[in-house]
């Protein structure tokens, strides 16, 4: 006697859901740019464009955003961890009025999914606005403390945000 099983995986979210979540991330990035002056609002929007592009293709697992002063020390950070199912959280963007640091810089590091690594030919054709390079920089924020969390989600798709100060 033999038996067989089959299963299907269905996502309940759409591109519109991804756009809604990334719109909150974009608002955070613009607030960071506005308060720190370490990047321009235009640059923040370019980063958000690329984050959305990768998120829509299920290529993104995490985004790390860190404010670094002119001495190379971390001042603040946030990490967005992306979920493609069972995401919850409906908070509005905000809480990222970081210190004015015009001589500092904002570092953004993307972590990719396995799908990203297996589709390099498709990725090379995506219309990125930022020139991304590989890095070995740490995103563990050992010099900072976790100070809060919030989540952005829509129909099961979402990004959990962890804040460090």
Image: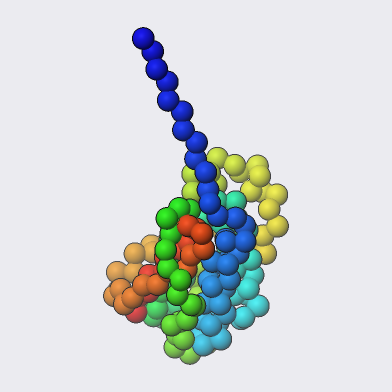
Residue at x 38% of width, y 70% of height: 162
Q: Which quarter of the figure has residue 56?
A: bottom right
- Point out residue 124 in the picture as x, y percentages from the top left corner: 66, 48
Task: Specify the farthest residue to the bottom.
Answer: 100
Residue at the image position 34 percent from the left and 64 percent from the top = 140
Instruction: Please state which of residues 134 and 99 is positioned toward the viewer in this rendering.
Output: 99
Q: Quadrant of the C terminus?
A: bottom left
Height in image: 49 above or below 6?
A: below
Q: Quadrant of residue 74?
A: bottom left
Q: Position of residue 135 (x, y in %)?
A: 48, 58
Residue 134: where, in percent of width, then height? 52, 55
Quadrant placement of the N terminus: top left
Q: Is residue 91 above or below residue 109?
A: below
**Depicted 92 relative to depicted 117: above or below:** below
The answer to whether residue 104 is above or below residue 126 is below
- Relative to 61, is 17 on the left or the right? right
Does the rendering let one see residue 21?
A: yes
Color theme of the render? rainbow
Q: How many marks?
A: 0
Is 51 situated left or right of 153 in this image? Answer: right
Q: Which residue is at the front of the view, 60 or 6?
A: 6
Image coordinates of residue 76 in percent, x first then y, are 40, 78
User: Within the image, what quadrant is residue 46 found in?
Assistant: bottom right
Residue 144 seen anywhere in this rendered image of the structure: no
Q: Residue at x 62, y 61 (%)?
A: 16
């Amino acid at each position: 006697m033999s038996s067989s099983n089959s299963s299907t995986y269905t996502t309940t979210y759409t591109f519109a859901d991804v756009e809604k979540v990334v719109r909150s991330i974009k608002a955070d990035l613009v607030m960071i740019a506005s308060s720190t002056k370490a990047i321009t609002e235009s640059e923040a929007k370019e980063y958000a464009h690329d984050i959305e592009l990768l998120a829509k293709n299920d290529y993104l697992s995490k985004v790390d955003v860190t404010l670094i002063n002119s001495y190379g020390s971390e001042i603040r950070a946030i990490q967005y961890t992306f979920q493609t199912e069972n995401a919850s959280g409906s908070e509005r963007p905000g809480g990222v009025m970081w210190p004015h640091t015009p001589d500092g810089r904002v570092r953004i590091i993307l972590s990719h999914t396995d799908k990203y690594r297996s589709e390099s030919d498709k990725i090379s054709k995506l219309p990125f606005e930022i020139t991304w390079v590989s890095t070995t920089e740490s995103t563990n924020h050992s010099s900072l403390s976790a100070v809060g969390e919030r989540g952005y989600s829509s129909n099961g798709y979402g990004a959990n945000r962890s804040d460090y100060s």
